[in-house]
Amino acid sequence: MKKASRVEPGQEGVKTRRAKASARPEPAQAALPTRAEIVAFIAREREALGDRSPAKIGKREIARAFDIKGAGRIELKRILKELEADGAIERRRTTLHKPGVLPGVVLADFYSRDRDGDFLAAPVEWDASAGPAPKIVVGVPRRQKPGGPAPGVGDRALLRVELIPGAEQGEPSYSGRVVKILPKAKAQVLGIFRANPGGGGGGRVAPIDKKNIGQGELDVAAGYEGEARDGDLVAVEVAPGRRFGLPSARVRERLGAIDSEKAVSLIAIHAHQIPSVFSSDVLAEAERARPATMDLREDWRDVPLLTIDPADAKDHDDAVHAERDPDPENPGGFVLRIAIADVAAYVRPGTPLDRAALDRGNSVYFPDRVVPMLPERISNDLCSLRPDEDRPALAALIVIAADGRKLRHSFHRVMMRSAAKLSYPQAQSIIDAAIDGAPHETTAPLLERVLTPLYEAYAALKIARGKRAPLDLDLPERKIILNPEGAVDRVIVPPRLDAHRLIEEFMILANVAAAETLEARRQAFIYRTHDEPSIEKLHNFIEFLASIEIKFAKGQVMRSEQFNGVLVRVRGTSNEHLVNEVVLRTQAQAEYVIENYGHFGLNLKRYAHFTSPIRRYADLIVHRALIAALRLGPDGLPPMSREELSEVAARISAAERRAMAAERETVERLIAAHLVGEIGATFEGRISGATRAGLFVRLDGTGADGFIPAATLGDDYFRHDPALHALVGSRTGQMHRMGDIVSVKLVEAAPLAGALRFELLSEAPGRARRKTTGKPSPRRDSKPLASSRRQR
């Protein structure tokens, strides 16, 4: 049924002007409306339509309204371009708008939910000069279309929007209805721009990862190259399909010269769409934050809490303290205090700062930079537990017995003052000097008052850890050291110290206490879980062990100590390296969920991340949950449905995987660039994997990973045996197995792809092929590169 026609305010003016224009003599048609009149007309028309109509307001509509014909339309086009260039109007496709007003249909991203469960969305495109982007509230449909996708936080959708009359400041100013949920956006195509010779503009882009488009180079027409110069790393948008010729593309962003020191990490940041720039409203909110006060806080400023971190750490979000328990009923026991930066005091739910943190999920660490979850004003200033400065913290007070068993615990919102800041090597050197009987006079007070009780408490916790029997994969992690130009200087394996293990055990204990408290209070929160290995992986593992004559007694309930028994059996043998790798690959991936199924690797029934809210959003959720459950302040976790909390858990799990992939790829690119001048050189390494396509080899020293195609292994046909983790020759029976020590020649290095290609020469000199007897080898093999601690 058609709506009854009515005359809207502003339309009378248009009709009157049109009538006057038609009554003018022909020469008067040259008189065009002023710039102000055009802007006013667009605003009146949008206001009259209430942004509900799909009707567009473009050059044709303006020409009709002012009765502009012939040559006058050319002049009108010029005026509109000037207005657009000056920001007085903006063009969306063929429709003109006054800035600050949404069109009737808008592309928007769902970023959160309100207290009523409705979605909150923001337009994808918005001119920041017109003020903050308006909020759009989108009701959840009671009945979903059969087979239709249900919207969720993080989705992008086409919305039909209406202005909400009289909306208060800070509240949604538009209501929206979902027209269509769009597919997930594809990753940007990154490549190297090569300008056309002759300086006529345009050029071609050679993608870094050709599988993104599958058609080689992209054509960039003149005028679509943006600010890109020849040799620059660029992000491009591929135009929908040409039937013939190269696909066309438009340069969206110039990322910098490819030989610059930061280009390598930029590739990973953009390839994985990691948010790396804070918006102005997020930075403004962080700058407005003021130091927390003593309101609702206990005073712990006299407790000599200590921070122990990596030497290059810029933020310090955990501090520890231990003392002998004076309770005579707990002889030899300790009272531990683990204080964690109170990020929840500054990052409130639903604010721009909070949304930005959720979008990032976690901080991402590259050799040349850190992409932080929170702005420096929060992470490196207000929440960093600096020595001799008052800092708010959420703290666990835990009483343990002499054998490390946790007897009881409680949580407190406190004001603390760190007594000292130490690096891991510093803390270890102080305690080692004391053991040797030569403590330094400047560190003696710190040693007696703080460090000695900490190490004594750690000795007790080691007893409890031994009884708990977590998965004992203490694998070293390589660290890349860059030179001032941003290139690889060297690759080191930092020693694994007792100082590292001390902090790790204290943090695990606090994480367990947090999960237990929230469960007891029936407070919804996010668990950190790690499932037991799948049946398929376990079956392959048993077959693998049989190949090296080790029996694996599979119990009815899988426990980490069963894997530890295997690791103990091969310790000191030629199979140690291989078995460690296979055990690691047999494990599931840790994740964040709202339904608990325990942590297999740590052998814990319940576990949550509590100790790093500066760099992990999961920990911030747990902090808020504790504040709400224990009534420690008004800034706790707001009421959330299980579906909402599950969405958050899924998003931060995905963000963690995204960060791990970006970090790994950056290291691979840096190492490949480091070795590009070594083509033809010979290296020793180990086979780190076997597939039907070929072998992966990890070099000694640098830890660089490269590939040997199966077709280059010889004149035999090699088949892949997944249970043996090997390629086996069909005719000769020759086997190339994961863990084998080999000598290889570097044939090709592709820094932008992070790829190395090797040629297999022989086994390393003086090393016989691996035997399966389990006899010790004359020299201990180095342990493999892995990153297992993130899984905890």
Image (cartoon, grey):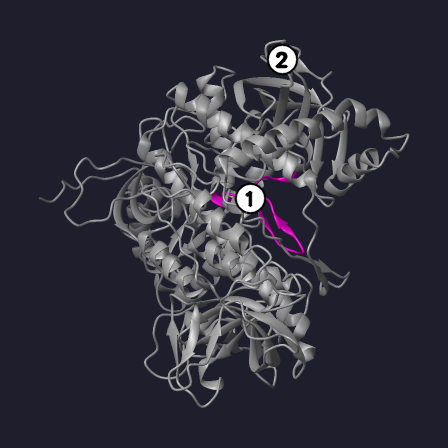
Residue displayed at 49% across by 84% down: 713
Query: Residue 540 is drawn in which quadrant?
Result: bottom left
Query: Residue 490 is drawn in which quadrant?
Result: bottom right
- The answer to whether residue 324 is visible is yes
Q: Residue 630: x, y in percent?
A: 47, 16
Q: Residue 235: x, y in percent?
A: 52, 65
Q: Main secondary structure of the magenta part?
A: loop
Viewer-side label of 1, 2:
2
Q: Amino acid at mark 1?
A: Ser
The one of 356 and 431 positioned closer to us in this rendering:
431
**What's the magenta region?**
359-376
Q: Residue 216: x, y in percent?
A: 45, 79
In the figure, is residue 472 to the left or right of 378?
Answer: left
Residue annotated with mark 2? 298
State the residue lying farthest toward the top: 328
Of pointers 1 and 2, the one earlier in the residue sequence: 1
The one of 744 and 564 positioned closer to us in this rendering:
564
Query: Residue 740 is drawn in which quadrant?
Result: bottom right
| SS for callout 2 | strand
The quarter of the rendered structure image containing the N terminus is top left
The one of 438 and 259 positioned closer to us in this rendering:
438
- Mark 1 is surrounded, within 10 Å at the Cα level, by few (under 14), some (14 to 19) or many (20 or more) other residues, namely few
In the image, residue 635 above or below residue 663: above
Q: Which mark is residue 279?
A: 1
Residue displayed at 38% across by 32% down: 172
